[in-house]
């Protein structure tokens, strides 16, 4: 039977790859709904190519321009942040690919979980800030959660070889980003251009900066805790510059199972769509004989304090992950806008975590209040230092 798919964030790096995958999978998969924030041109092109039934432009500013471009479109066009929820909960939709960047995707993901949709989750931020709420809601409503993040997809695939109670350690691999060999002093002088040049992955700007600070790995630690129902103590981070081993699981008998592939997001996206089956993929084949050597090393925790912070925040829990994520989102935005230096991103996050009195978050409203507080702290910090 045809699977109807909604993509939240179809104009981003993951969204574009998801469309390529769905096109290649053929008639068993149909793009039923897509969304963008403000990229009207691409959303209009994608609509013409894939003929979804519903599209949404979260930022209403260019809504009229979108309508003009799609004057012949027979489907529905919605606008405003809440329209993401309409896409995610459309009756006909079976699988929701969550590829919006940041916390903005959370309400739609939660509503999709309430409707029992299968969630193919690329957008790690909702897991970080509302892991408990999201996993509980999904369980109560039989909504399957399938990871798209390459590391978590790898762990998920490795776990087919045993069960979570037989796991001794989850080994999250990390490329180490462009500054893997940098000292803390060298990190102070990093430019925006350098930070946007990831050595192995081609991704959107926010996650590219997160990879350079290694905040991405820190967020992934928390994501793994919730996705696999494990403790932070059972997770370790290993630098693997070639990005071929996407992560590993060490079982209690000493067996280590790894998942490998070229650094290409089409593979984990496709696995989330076809699971539990596999289908012929569009990813480039791995040629280990050409690669020759794979390297592994410990992360430098002096240069990359984000990893230490990630473990601390995962262990302490409460509302700290909300602050951790919001402070990072806001600080990265400030860095991308040229208002702060690269090294200030982590300093600002540390400042916000120190100022915050953690509470246990019980509602979405409370969670977004804390998110707003943390973002305001970042702006205060930036205005005092400039
Ligand atoms: N890229 C990767 O390889 C990769 C790998 C693993 C996990 N992820 C995760 O996947 C998510 C997406 O990453 P990405 O690299 O694809 O990001 P991206 O290229 O920046 O794309 C983000 C998408 O979200 C939309 N968007 C941005 N802000 C929005 C808002 N406030 N409301 C609604 N839509 C909004 C964008 O629309 P416009 O185009 O209109 O701005 C775009 O479609 C992130 O959570 C990231 O951590 C990405």
Image: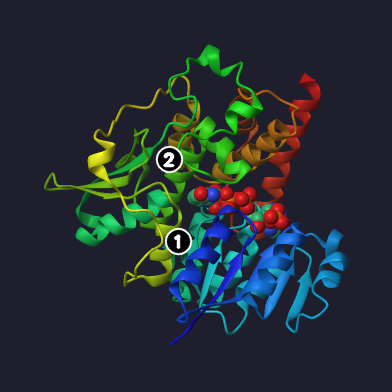
Please name the colour scheme applied to the rendered image: rainbow
Q: Can you see residue 31?
A: yes
Q: Which mark is residue 315?
A: 2
User: Dividing the image into 4 quarters, which one contains the N terminus?
Assistant: bottom left
Mark 1 and mark 2 in contact? Answer it, CB < 8 Å.
no
Using residue 215 as the reference point, say whether residue 383 is left or right of it: right
Q: Nearer the viewer, mark 1 or mark 2?
A: 1
Position of residue 195 measured from the top left corner of the image (x, y, whole percent): 58, 29
User: Dividing the image into 4 quarters, which one contains the C terminus?
Assistant: top right
Q: Can you see residue 128?
A: no
Give the crowd class for mark 2: few <14, some 14-19, many >=20 residues within 10 Å: some
Q: How many marks?
A: 2
> Is ligand 1 less than 8 Å from the beta carbon at label 2?
no
Q: Can you name the residue that lies furthest to the top here?
A: 185
Question: In this rendering, is residue 12 above or below 55?
Answer: above
Q: Which mark is residue 350?
A: none
Give the crowd class for mark 1: few <14, some 14-19, many >=20 residues within 10 Å: many
Name the residue: 33% across, 50% down: 261
Camera-side residue of 232 and 355: 232
Camera-side residue of 172 and 40: 40
Q: Which mark is residue 269?
A: 1
Using residue 280 as the reference point, say whether residue 119 is left or right of it: right
Q: CA distance from mark 1 to mark 2?
A: 29 Å
Name the residue: 44% across, 30% down: 308
């Amino acid at each position: 039977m045809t699977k109807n798919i909604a993509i939240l964030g179809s104009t981003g790096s993951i969204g574009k790859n998801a469309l390529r995958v769905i096109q290649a999978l053929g008639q068993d998969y149909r793009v039923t709904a897509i969304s963008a924030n403000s990229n009207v041109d691409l959303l209009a092109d994608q609509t013409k190519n894939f003929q979804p039934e519903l599209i949404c432009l979260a930022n209403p500013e260019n809504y009229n321009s979108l309508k003009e471009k799609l004057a012949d479109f027979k489907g529905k066009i919605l606008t405003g942040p809440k329209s993401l929820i309409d896409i995610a909960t459309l009756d006909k939709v079976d699988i929701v690919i969550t590829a919006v960047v940041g916390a903005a995707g959370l309400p739609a993901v939660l509503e999709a979980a309430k409707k029992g949709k299968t969630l193919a989750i690329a957008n790690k931020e909702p897991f970080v800030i509302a892991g408990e709420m999201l996993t509980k809601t999904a369980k109560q409503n039989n909504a399957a959660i399938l990871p798209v993040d390459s590391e978590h997809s790898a762990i998920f695939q490795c776990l087919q070889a045993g069960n979570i109670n037989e796991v001794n350690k989850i080994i999250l691999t990390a490329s180490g980003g462009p500054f893997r060999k940098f000292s803390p002093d060298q990190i102070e002088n990093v430019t925006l251009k350098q930070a946007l040049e990831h050595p192995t992955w081609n991704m959107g700007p926010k996650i590219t900066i997160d990879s350079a600070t290694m905040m991405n790995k820190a967020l992934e630690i928390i994501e793994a805790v919730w996705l696999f129902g494990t403790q932070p103590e059972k997770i370790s981070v290993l630098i693997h510059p070639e990005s071929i081993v996407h992560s590993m699981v060490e079982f209690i008998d000493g067996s280590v199972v790894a998942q490998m592939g070229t650094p290409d997001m089409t593979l984990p996206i496709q696995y989330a769509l076809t699971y539990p089956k596999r289908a012929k993929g569009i990813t480039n084949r791995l040629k280990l004989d050409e690669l020759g050597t794979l390297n592994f090393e410990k992360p430098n925790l002096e240069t990359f304090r984000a990893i230490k912070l990630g473990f601390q925040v995962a262990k302490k829990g409460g509302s700290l992950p909300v602050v951790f994520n919001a402070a990072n989102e806001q600080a990265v935005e400030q860095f991308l806008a040229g208002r702060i230096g690269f090294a200030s991103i982590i300093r600002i996050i540390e400042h916000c975590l120190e100022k915050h009195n953690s509470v246990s978050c019980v509602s979405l409203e409370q969670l977004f209040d804390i998110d707003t507080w943390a973002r305001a702290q970042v702006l205060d910090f930036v205005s005092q230092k400039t």
